[in-house]
C-alpha cells in the first residue's frame, strides 16, 4: 500500500524505465530510482531521535524537546543534550557525569542529588532549578543562569562559574573549594556556612549576599562588590580583598587575620571588633 507520494514516485520511475534505449533514460532512470527509494525507505526523522532517547537506545538528543519528562535515576553519563529543552524535567538522582548540556533549558528542573560531575552546562538556563545535594564537581557552568536555584549542600569543587548568574541562589552549606566565580553575580545569594576555600571571586557581585559562618580562607575577592553583605563570623583568613567595595558590609566576629585590604573601599563597614570603619584602606591586613 502506498500513499499518493509513493504512487507518484513509482509512476515516475515506471515512465523513466519505459524510455530504455534513449539518451534521456540514462539521466531519468537513476534519478527516478533515487526518488523511489527515498519515498519507500525514508531517513529517520528528528522525532525518531527523541523516541530512541526516551527508549534508552541512544544518549544523543541534541536540541530535543524533553520538557516535563521523567528521567529519575536514569543513567545518562556522557549524554549529548546540548540545547535540549528540559524545562520542569525530573532528573532526580540521575547520572549525568560528563554530559553535554551547553545551552540547554533546565528551568525548574529537578536535579536533586544528580551527579553532574565534569558536565558541560555552559550557558545553560537553570532558573528555579532544584540542585539540592547535587554533585557538580569539575563542571562547567560559565555564563549559566542559576537565578533562584536551590543548591543547598551541593558540591562544586573546582567548577567553573565564570560570569554565571546566581542571584538569590540558595547555596547554604555548599562546597565550592577552588571554584572559579570570576565576574559572577551572586547578589542576594545565601552562602551561610558554605565552604569556599581558595575560591576565585574576583570582580564578582556579592551585594546583600549572606556569608554568615562561611569559610573563605585564601579566597580571592579582588575588586569584588560586597556592599551590604552579611559576613558575620565568616573566615577570611589569608583572603585577598584588595580594591573590594565594602560599603555597609558586616564583618562582625569574622576572622580577617592576614587578609589583604589594599585599596578596599570602606563606608559604614562593621569590622570584626564591632567598630565602624569609613576611611578607605591604603594597605595592610586586619
Image (spheres, rainbow, N blue to C red):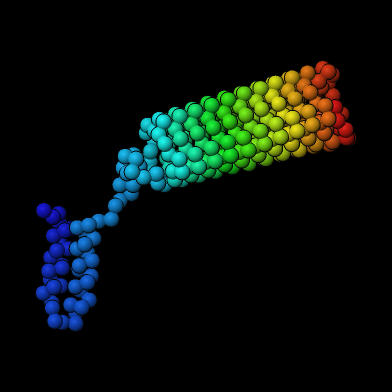
Please identify the quarter of the rendering in which residue 40 is found. Answer: bottom left
Q: Is residue 20 left or right of residue 229?
A: left
Tell me the residue at 61%/27% (across/down).
Answer: 174
| Looking at the image, residue 259 lies above or below residue 85 | above
Please identify the quarter of the rendering in which residue 143 is found. Answer: top right
Closer to us: 32 or 100: 100
The answer to whether any part of residue 68 appears in the image is no
The answer to whether any part of residue 271 appears in the image is yes
| Looking at the image, residue 202 lies above or below residue 17 | above
Residue 193: x and y in percent read 66, 22
All told, the count of numbered labels is 0
Residue 93: x and y in percent read 45, 29
| Looking at the image, residue 214 lies above or below residue 50 | above
Specify the quadrant that holds the C terminus.
Answer: top right
Residue 279: x and y in percent read 87, 29
Tell me the residue at 52%/30% (across/down).
Answer: 134
Q: Is residue 283 left or right of residue 44?
A: right
Q: Is residue 284 left or right of residue 202?
A: right
Tell me the residue at 57%/42% (across/down).
Answer: 140
Residue 268: x and y in percent read 80, 23
Tell me the residue at 66%/27% (across/down).
Answer: 195
Amino acid at each position: 500500500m502506498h500513499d499518493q507520494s509513493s504512487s507518484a514516485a513509482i509512476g515516475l520511475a515506471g515512465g523513466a524505465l519505459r524510455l530504455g534505449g534513449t539518451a534521456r533514460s540514462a539521466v531519468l532512470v537513476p534519478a527516478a530510482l533515487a526518488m523511489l527509494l527515498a519515498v519507500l525507505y525514508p531517513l529517520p526523522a528528528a522525532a525518531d531521535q527523541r523516541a530512541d532517547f526516551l527508549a534508552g537506545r541512544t544518549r544523543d538528543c541534541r536540541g530535543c524537546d524533553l520538557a516535563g519528562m521523567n528521567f529519575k535515576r536514569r543513567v545518562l553519563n556522557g549524554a549529548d543534550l546540548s540545547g535540549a529543552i528540559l524545562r520542569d524535567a525530573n532528573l532526580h538522582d540521575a547520572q549525568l557525569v560528563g554530559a553535554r548540556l551547553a545551552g540547554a533549558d533546565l528551568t525548574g528542573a529537578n536535579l536533586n542529588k544528580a551527579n553532574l560531575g565534569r558536565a558541560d552546562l555552559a550557558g545553560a538556563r537553570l532558573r528555579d532549578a532544584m540542585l539540592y545535594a547535587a554533585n557538580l564537581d569539575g563542571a562547567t557552568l560559565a555564563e549559566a543562569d542559576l537565578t533562584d536555584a536551590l543548591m543547598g549542600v551541593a558540591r562544586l569543587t573546582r567548577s567553573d562559574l565564570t560570569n554565571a548568574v546566581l542571584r538569590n541562589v540558595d547555596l547554604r552549606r555548599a562546597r565550592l573549594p577552588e571554584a572559579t566565580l570570576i565576574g559572577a553575580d551572586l547578589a542576594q545569594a545565601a552562602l551561610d556556612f558554605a565552604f569556599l576555600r581558595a575560591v576565585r571571586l574576583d570582580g564578582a557581585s556579592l551585594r546583600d549576599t549572606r556569608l554568615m559562618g562561611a569559610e573563605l580562607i585564601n579566597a580571592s575577592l579582588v575588586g569584588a562588590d560586597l556592599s551590604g553583605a552579611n559576613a558575620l563570623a565568616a573566615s577570611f583568613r589569608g583572603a585577598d580583598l584588595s580594591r573590594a567595595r565594602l560599603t555597609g558590609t558586616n564583618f562582625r566576629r569574622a576572622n580577617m587575620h592576614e587578609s589583604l585590604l589594599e585599596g578596599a573601599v570602606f563606608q559604614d563597614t562593621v569590622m570584626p571588633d564591632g567598630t565602624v570603619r569609613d576611611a578607605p584602606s591604603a594597605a595592610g591586613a586586619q
